[in-house]
Amino acid sequence: MKHIARKRFGQHFLTDPGVIDAIVRAIDPRPGDAMVEIGPGLAALTQPLVERLGRLRVIELDRDLAARLRLHGQLDVTEADVLTVDFSALPGAAPGALRVVGNLPYNISTPILFHLLDHVAVVKDQHFMLQKEVIDRMVAAPATGDYGRLSVMLQWRYAMENVLFVPPEAFDPPPKVDSAVVRMVPLAEPPAIDLKHFSAMVQTAFSQRRKILRHTLGKWLEARNAAGNFDLQRRAEEVPVSEYISLAQRTQA
């Protein structure tokens, strides 16, 4: 029986064979890789991946799809909301070992990216299909319209690149937006920061994008007696990631 895409799960199934092949080539799966696929859906990407890997773990929330996937002899199925999955405790998880892939549900893609940030120590790389505009924000440079909280929070920890454009007609049903595939590789020697402190600081900085930082981050720094020589006469989008990192290191307990 044909599976009907469920809007509440943000389901758009990849169907274009040429796009699927290009994504698999970008991921470059090798036998024995500890790979996890988020949201395998109808297994369009799953099948060519597992043919190269030998075995693949998949995380699927949709009960009907999870039941279908369990019939596949080479898949280990975790039926769960990905935001509840402890990636650090998955079989095969070890420092820099997991390769995470997926056509992420567009309605919760940002929460998934932040959830994985908590488990980055066990990740080797990540390849995700996302809305193109989300990837534009992820890889954006300072002083551009796309540069924001997401850019800073991910760039401090990953090297990222947009590796493939994917048009709406590659999906069934077609989404109303353009898509793309991003490659995310954790930095080998990331800056030493308190992630909770850094996250709170960056969120405060971008809380009112149009105002200069004196009105937002300035108050946050004053409360910590830590204003120092940081230039608060700028907007949040004008400050490079490296400066946010330095400020976080200087102000964390």
Image (spheres, grey):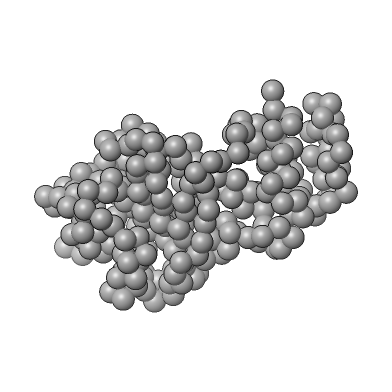
Q: In this view, does 119 lie above or below 167?
A: above
Residue visible at 82% across and 45% down? 213
Camera-side residue of 104 and 26: 26
Residue 61 visible, this orientation: no
Give the percent coordinates (x, y) of residue 244: 71, 43
Q: Quadrant of residue 169?
A: bottom left
Left or right: where 14 falls relative to 247: left
Q: In this view, does 9 lie above or below 14?
A: above
Give the percent coordinates (x, y) of residue 220: 79, 33
Q: In which quarter of the image is the N terminus?
A: bottom left
Give the percent coordinates (x, y) of residue 72: 14, 52
Left or right: where 239 falls relative to 8: right
Q: Is residue 132 above or below residue 39?
A: below
Residue visible at 31% across and 51% down? 37
Give the percent coordinates (x, y) of residue 232: 85, 44
Residue visible at 15% across and 50% down? 74
